């Protein structure tokens, strides 16, 4: 089976951003994304996730490199200053090239 | 009966467990379910009572109460911005929390009055809904001036009318009102009978949350701490004065005083996060949840009830 290289963009953000993130992702040329609840500690203090207001989300998108760069830049530009947001991009291997 | 309400003891237990880092954590889904239950239960009870009596003239009291919410937000903003020199966005966001209401505090005062057999008007939940809305609008206007764009207005409207609190309270009111006492009878065991137990769990969780917030405020100076105690006292005084003027009973006046004294920690934080993202949520939540909520639940409510009884005698 042939393997294909893609990028995995991970956004870790405060839960309040979920509607905005979902809305913005719908404008990107991607086939899908996965969101999970998360908790942790960072530059903006502890986010224990005991209520919807104090939690984080972790949003993952697998896509081509140019799209990954665009998502990372646009999200940091729009939300990076005022919201708790961490963005990182890593390499992944997928088996079905047409899917991503 | 003990002088301290059991719900307050549950709150104290939560604070103790939080500070001592005891191994207690209510899952977020349970907290969400508990708030959903409380909001629906309060709405249903109000709706059933409204169906029982012919609906009295509500427009004048409703508008007066909403104006009080606006006045409180502007007053809070003035104190924060010009006395405490807090930045514009932060001052507007914190003021909006204080101009709005806390449903949890409403639940505590209603349980306090019921335990003491003091009756209050059935339409108080309508005031809860009415007070959620103006403070958010005024807060956003104070923060942004007149620069509210088109897409902003759309999300503001969404936050205002489709927030959890408004939808569940109004939905509960309508269901209770439409079904009436007879239709709702099979549900009362769950929604009304279960209210106190759920409220106790809610206050346990609030204690845990509050313990986590107290340390947030420690670094922000005494100014905000004093504001978080002064503001509910001013709100309580405003409510206790307004109650007799708009024809509320002693119980209703006490509930209104408590509503105006309380600060939102659900609807407004979510709305401010979206509409005024440059405001620091730690400040407003620290003040509302870390200081004002515990103050109201322990010392405030008995004080507002006494004040309302006194002013009711003088003013009506």
Image (spheres, coloured by chain):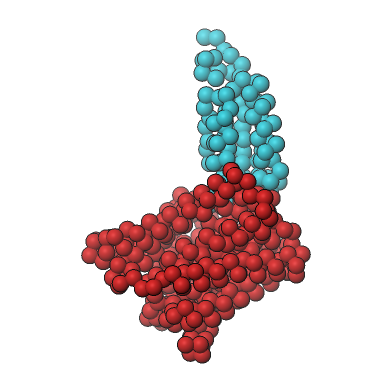
Chain colours: A cyan, B red
- Asked if residue B87 is positioned above or below residue A74 in the image, the reply reads below
Give me the residue at 66% from left, 27% from top: A70
Q: Nearer the viewer, residue B183 or A1?
A: B183
Give me the residue at 54% from left, 31% from top: A26
In percent of width and height, residue B258 lies at 51, 73
In percent of width and height, residue A12 lies at 62, 38
Q: Nearer the viewer, residue B143 or A84?
A: B143
As drawn, the residue found furthest toward the left would be B182
Instruction: Give the image quarter of residue B177.
Output: bottom left
Q: In this view, does B195 lie to the left or right of B202?
A: left
In percent of width and height, residue A36 lies at 52, 38
Q: In this view, does B186 lie to the left or right of B191?
A: left
Q: Which of A64 and B53 is in front in this view?
A: B53
As drawn, the residue found furthest toward the bottom would be B314
**Residue B139 shows in the view:** yes
Q: Nearer the viewer, residue A14 or B95?
A: B95
Give me the residue at 64% from left, 63% from top: B95
Instruction: Give the image quarter of residue A100.
Output: top right
In percent of width and height, residue B253 lies at 47, 78
As drawn, the residue found furthest toward the top would be A1
The mark tally for this picture is: 0
**Residue A45 shows in the view:** no
Give me the residue at 58% from left, 58% from top: B137
Image quadrant containing the N terminus of chain B: bottom left
- Asked if residue A28 is positioned above or below residue A1 in the image, the reply reads below
């Amino acid at each position: 089976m042939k393997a294909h290289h893609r990028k995995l963009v991970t956004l870790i953000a405060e839960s309040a951003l979920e509607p905005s993130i979902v809305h913005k992702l719908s404008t990107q040329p991607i086939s899908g994304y996965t969101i999970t609840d998360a908790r942790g500690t960072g530059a903006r203090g502890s986010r224990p996730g005991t209520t919807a207001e104090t939690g984080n989300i972790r949003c993952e998108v697998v896509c081509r490199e140019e799209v990954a760069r665009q998502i990372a830049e646009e999200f940091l530009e729009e939300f990076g200053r005022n919201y708790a947001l961490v963005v990182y991009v890593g390499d992944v291997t997928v088996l079905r090239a047409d899917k991503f | 009966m003990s002088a301290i309400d059991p719900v307050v003891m549950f709150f104290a237990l939560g604070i103790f467990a939080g500070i001592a880092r005891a191994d207690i954590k209510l899952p977020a889904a349970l907290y969400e379910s508990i708030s959903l239950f409380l909001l629906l239960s309060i709405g249903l009870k109000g709706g059933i009572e409204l169906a029982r009596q012919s609906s009295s003239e509500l427009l004048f009291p409703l508008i007066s109460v909403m104006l009080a919410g606006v006045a409180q937000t502007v007053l809070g903003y003035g104190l924060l911005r010009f006395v405490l020199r807090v930045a514009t966005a932060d001052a507007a966001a914190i003021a909006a929390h204080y101009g709005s209401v806390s449903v949890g505090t409403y639940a505590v005062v209603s349980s306090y009055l019921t335990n003491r057999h003091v009756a209050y008007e059935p339409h108080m939940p309508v005031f809860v809904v009415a007070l959620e809305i103006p403070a958010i609008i005024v807060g956003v206007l104070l923060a942004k001036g007149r620069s509210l764009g088109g897409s902003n207005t759309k999300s503001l409207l969404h936050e205002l009318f489709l927030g959890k609190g408004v939808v569940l309270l109004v939905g509960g009111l309508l269901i209770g009102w439409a079904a009436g006492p007879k239709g709702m009878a099979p549900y009362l065991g769950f929604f009304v009978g279960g209210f106190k137990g759920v409220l106790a769990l809610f206050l346990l969780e609030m204690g845990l949350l509050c313990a986590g917030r107290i340390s947030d405020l420690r670094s922000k100076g005494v100014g905000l701490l004093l504001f978080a105690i002064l503001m509910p006292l001013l709100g309580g005084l405003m409510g206790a004065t307004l109650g007799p003027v708009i024809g509320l009973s002693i119980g209703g006046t006490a509930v209104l005083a408590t509503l105006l004294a309380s600060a939102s920690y659900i609807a407004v934080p979510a709305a401010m996060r979206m509409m005024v993202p440059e405001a620091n949520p730690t400040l407003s939540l620290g003040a509302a949840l870390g200081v004002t909520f515990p103050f109201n639940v322990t010392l405030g409510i008995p004080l507002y009830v006494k004040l309302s009884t006194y002013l009711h005698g003088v003013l009506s």
